[in-house]
Amino acid sequence: MRFERREHRPLALVILTPLLAVAAAMALSGLLIAAAGAPVLEAYWRILVGAFGSRLSATETLTRATPLMLTGLAAAVAFRARVWNIGGEGQFYLGAIAVAAVGSRLLADAPGFLSIPLLLVTGAVAGMILLIVPLWLRLKFSVDEVVTSLLLNFVAVLVVSMLIDGPLKDPLAFGWPQSQAVPDAAMLPKLVARSRLHWGVGIALGLAFVVHFVQSRTVFGLKSRAAGLSPEGAIFAGVPLARTLLLVACLSGGLAGLAGAVEVMGVKGYVTTDLSPGFGYSGIVVAMLAGLHPLGVVLAALFTATMFVGADGMSRALKIPTYIADVTVALSLITMLVAVFFAQYRIRR
Amino acid sequence: MTETVLEIDRVSKSFGDNKANDAISMTLARGEIVALLGENGAGKTTLMSILFGHYVPDEGHIHVFGAELPPGRPRAAIHAGIGMVHQHFSLASNLTVLENVMTGTETLWSWRSETGRARAKLTSLAERFGLAVDPDARLGDLSVGEQQRVEILKALYNDARILILDEPTAVLTNLEAETLFVTLKEMARQGLSLIFISHKLDEVMAAADRVVVLRGGKVVAERRAADTSKAELAELMVGHRVARPVREAHERGASVLEAAAVSVRIDGVDRLKDVSFRLHAGEVLGIIGVSGNGQAALARMVSGTLARSSGDILLYGEAIGDLSVAGAIAAGIGRVPEDRTRDGAIGEMAVWENVVLERIDEPRFSRRGFVDRKASIAFTEAIISGFDVRGGGPLTRTRLLSGGNMQKLILGRNLADRPRILIAAQPARGLDEGAVAAVHARILDARKAGTAVLLISEDLDEVIGLADRIQAIVGGRLSAPVSTDEVDARALGLMMAGAWKKEAA
Ligand SMILES: Nc1ncnc2c1ncn2[C@@H]1O[C@H](COP(=O)(O)OP(=O)(O)OP(=O)(O)O)[C@@H](O)[C@H]1O
Ligand SMILES: [Mg+2]
């Protein structure tokens, strides 16, 4: 048996690949559920019910998917241009804390129509800055941004915990390390009353389309792809390599920072060190599941959120651990990578 | 009768609707050198890739030393005694020669490394065939010719008895090519069998015992080298008579690009020293020299990807400091780079994207930052038909074009706009006879229309055929120009050897 690279990939295959991958992952984690002594089909049913069974759970799933879409887009945009941004988590937190700081101080009395856009931009800019540093190090000193962007995650989280235990600490939080809150006027309006679902999901969806459009139709999209695929070829064609990659970094870091901003302004209003259950890292998984396609990111984020939210319901009903959700998401990443391989190659004999 | 070592029997392979190999049959005898000839895209590389197990044929069989070769298994091919020297070497530049030769053969389960034995085998092979290389040299430090020697040694190390070379001389200097053929003949004398692909008819006539000609995926002719001629082979390949175009006398115009005592230093090494030339509208200035003497730096400097350290560059009479890529394109300089797969095109992008990438900011290809796909594709289609690029359309991934067709695409992209200046580094490298004639005609047309052409080439025939004036490049220095009509090949040979340097000193 050997593999031969497929040169023509039928569209059906491109669409089927992730679906088959997810199905395979479900089948595999089904084995684990069975091993835990629970009925497999019912477990999956419970996940679906847990994620979409009621108005509350459905809005919860969408709320959870929102930051994942944004961090997923951040990773997808960067990876397309071969900028290995592993720092989504740090950019998320820096965006969040910047919003809390500016929102609770400078814009405390501003009306919503002013403070909301300003704060969203603030979060995005904070995320950008955190990615520009590693990219600059790569361009200037050829330092691998995989390492630097990853390590900056820890720096960012530590800075956040210092700030929320120090200058930004909320004096009314009974000593809990928690930042001051942004004013109510600066909170994103709810999309569905009496739920946590906010307008952030609309922002994320809109941005997915914008990113798709930018990548497929604009000069910048073409140049950034060239820069990612072949630096030598891009330079020869006059693509300003450093500037193009810097713009990519701004877009990617900005999206991850925006995820943090939206999470603060949409859900909690303030920052704690458990604001993100790893949204930045999960964004990488989401991007890979989506095959780095911006519209695919939306679906992959929904899938991931469904698994996480639904697993709670399943675990309550069947008394099996919620870790099943982690395992399924991780398994689907692996099956996706295998499926992508098979979609690109064909087996001969 | 001599023993048949390889028998290809009605092998076919299609890519989509494209029949790259159509029932090809050929044989190879012990101790024989066969040249495989054919137009760009005729299917030569495809056939050799099938032989080596990279592709699975749709139909047909291959027998090696009488046994059927299982299709699509490189390991089986190596085991059967087939060795392949790819045009783009598949060696690791950070390993030593010895390590490169050993990788792939060493079993993972061996108790100790077999370095000692490997070294002995490598040295004895190198001696036997006159392929001198230092086993401990890092591959990245070797010249292209030496790297190719390592590829050959690697095949021999794996006990190859049939050696396949895909356009081995395309990347070599003339001198290196001559050495290579001495080696190949020695290998044949010692009982190995060889197939090599080439577009250079001189070397085919000189080195091959037999010639097989492919056209459109089919074998159209087979000749003993002794019974044929260059002219016949060229005609068999293309299907009609080909003649290189003749340069007609032509009035040249004003100086458009001038270098005055330009030097370029990279990492403390002088790549160009006090280089001066003056390029006029409507003339071809040929720069000849053995490759590795500064041609690359010169080409890059005038293409805008290399900054000079001292001296002046004058564009249309004005000193401009360094040329940038954007500046060069804006000034109407067309650029054909020497390395088409690295600089000239991005393999994973579509053909149309490669065509418009360097001019995407112009209003005809984009408006307010949005790509005009329709216009870009229409422009690409015009180039594809105008320059006879075969094997794909605007949406094809560029990597899938055959080597020669990719070169035609790059030329087309630069000539389509009637550039005021054309920098052409080895423009005919890897092209078949017909395509060379077509490219030469295009360059002469451009000259007639007033384009100033800087032709950097190692091919004396090409330079004599196209250039009005010639300068030699030796060790990063340029000779004074001579008029092509006033020198002969011998004088040019002396120039390339640097004879003028002594006079000057
Ligand atoms: N992997 C592939 N997928 C699709 N088409 C291919 C592939 N490889 C080659 N082709 C097509 O098959 C034809 C034969 O290509 P091949 O590379 O064998 O030509 P060649 O004779 O080696 O030409 P050249 O002299 O230009 O190198 C071309 O039309 C080429 O575009
Ligand atoms: Mg070829």
Image (cartoon, coloured by chain):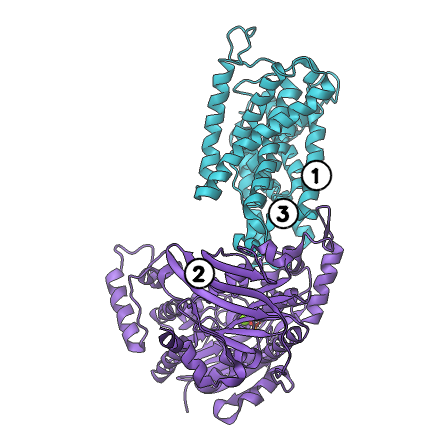
Chain colours: A cyan, B purple
Which of the image's four quarters has the C terminus of chain B? bottom left
- Whichever of callouts 3 and 1 sits on the residue coming sooner in the sequence is 3
Query: Is disc 3's CB within 8 Å of ligand 1?
Result: no
Closer to the camera in the image, B84 or B258: B258
Image vertical order of residue A230 relative to residue A103, above or below: below
Chain holding disc 1: A
Whole-percent x, y for residue A237 in the image: 59, 56
Kind of residue at badge 1? Val
**Residue that badge 2 annotates:** B263
Q: Nearer the viewer, mark 2 or mark 3?
A: 2
Q: Give the quadrant of residue A347.
A: bottom right
Q: Residues within 10 Å of mark 2 (few under 14, many from 20)?
A: many
Q: CA distance from mark 2 to mark 3?
A: 55 Å
Ligand 2, seen in the image, is in the quarter at bottom right
Kind of residue at badge 2? Ser
Q: Are marks 2 and 3 on the same chain?
A: no
Q: Are marks 1 and 2 on the same chain?
A: no
**Residue that badge 3 annotates:** A17
Q: Nearer the viewer, mark 3 or mark 1?
A: 1
- Labels 2 & 3 near each other (Cβ < 8 A): no
Whole-percent x, y for residue B306 in the image: 49, 56
Q: CA distance from mark 3 to mark 1?
A: 24 Å
**Residue that badge 1 annotates:** A210
